[in-house]
Image (tube, rainbow, N blue to C red):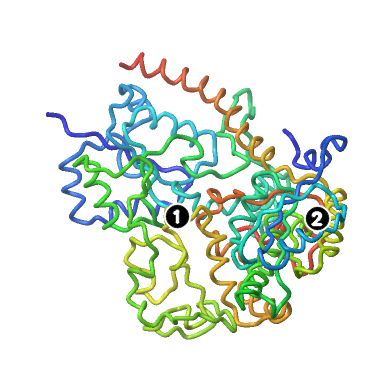
Amino acid sequence: MSKPKIAIYWCASCGGCEEAVVDLAEDILGVVEAVDIVLWPCAMDFKKSDVQAMPDGSIVATLLNGAIRSSEQEEMAHLLRRKSRYMIAYGACAHTGGIPGLANQFTREQMLRYVYEECPTVVNPERIHPRPHSKENGWSFELPELHNRVRALDQVVRVDYYVPGCPPTPAITKAAIGALLSGELPPVGSVLAPDYALCEQCKRKASKPENVSFVGFKRPHEVPLDPEKCFLAQGVICMGPATRAGCEAVCISGNMPCSGCFGPTSRVRDQGAKALSSFCANVAPKTEDEIDEVLAGIPDPVGTFYRYGLARSTLRGAITEPAAQSASKGSLSRVSPKTCC
Amino acid sequence: MNSPCQHAAGPATSWEPRIAAFFCNWCTYTAADLAGVSRLKYAPNVRVIRLMCSGRVDPQFILEAFARGADGVLIGGCHPGDCHYAEGNYKALRRFQMLKRVVNDFGIHPDRLRLEWISASEGDKVRTVVNEMVEQLRVIGPLNMPERNRDWDLELESMQEKITAHERAGREVANVQA
């Protein structure tokens, strides 16, 4: 009997999710024994045409990591969707947009201008930008087109399951592959991780104060961090309360606060808004000026609360509205290209 | 490509500002009731949602209101010290201070979001605040998030045609090889 076919593909991602698959260590041998990998551009030499030649639905599951931001990625997502029985959004970028999704705070033009002209390490006096179509010496060239917006996978194709994390941990990955192969799957659309907040899995939970009351916020590089005590008790933003469990608090074991990569639980639609709600409601002062002083300890709220979830959030990213900037005092330089990258 | 500015300059004739208002049961909602009973006239552009406390206003509600087409969001609660639940309005204020920054970072005009303390006896203040906000929003113009979202979805559709054409070409190659 032929083994079930699995495809692993990457879109707008850093390669960390590929690394996470390899991080299965010796368990990967068991996986390779149980399945046929039919596409894995990072590690194996299969071509797109190999996939195109397969009948629709013949791949059991595609694990696709990375956000969708170009026409080429969109095309591959559609192709793999057709060829696969299960489409799995693997990792934070495919799940909620991830770090690439933060680009939604800028327009495509701002981003291209910064990367190809204004970035201090760029020398480009002719201001050459990549173009979808170009001609040179009688040859014509085509490049994938960049979307205006970065999208999570399920904003482009139908997704059956989500494996969260930046990157997903070996345990989560193993459990997901096990579930796929055994066919013991939860309802379609589920995130393959526990549906409660990370604090439940955190070893420091006992030191979480009953009533958190922030008199100031510190960022991890600004204070020596107590390796035992709850980060919130130390005045450090830890996204644990607003983040799905499943990683077994690996970052916290390394004495770094949670940054929220597993996304929200099923009861929350907008992880950033919910995190903001919880942390800000619990600052100590009661007057506007004093509140602002404490909240100034969070210099980049969008980058803090929406670090992995911006593309999939309620507003999906920044819009351009005339006068929004100048009208507010103390605004962050959102549209200034200097803050890009 | 549509420039985002076109939305703001959209058809000014038919457009009326829409405000989603979250009023607390004990003070601001009662004040709005009083304004009604007193037959005070104010702009009909506000849709009032009654909550038990301004502390119940989840920031998700506010972003959702914008995303679904509100041009402005107004939160009304009891004056500091007067909260029926002692601390709820302080929680609302603290969230609001950060939300103003976040909303601005999202490129949304900060005047689209407003927090006011209005006690049960201040029916007149409801009128003033609503009228004022409607006038401000007329100047700022429509936010039109649903339309902007549609534009983003259309981007996918327009690329879809190119991709389908590209795929057809690719398939032929695959068939030749097979």
The location of residue A34, given as percent across then percent down, is 16, 41
Chain of the residue displaying label 2:
B
The location of residue B104, given as percent across then percent down, is 72, 59
The answer to whether residue A2 is left or right of residue B118 is left
Q: Could you give the CA–CA distance between mark 1 and mark 2, rounded to whole angstroms?
A: 37 Å
Vertical placement of residue A99 versus A45, above or below: below
| Residue A227 in view here | no
Quarter of the image with the C terminus of chain B in it: top left
The location of residue A91, given as percent across then percent down, is 40, 51
Q: Which residue is mark 2?
A: B36
Of residues A74 and A136, the one nearer the viewer is A74
Residue at left offset 28%, top offset 57%: A170
Q: Which residue is mark 1?
A: A267
Quarter of the image with the N terminus of chain B in it: top right
Residue at left offset 61%, top offset 77%: B87
> Which amino acid, mark 1?
Arg
Residue at left offset 33%, top offset 31%: A84
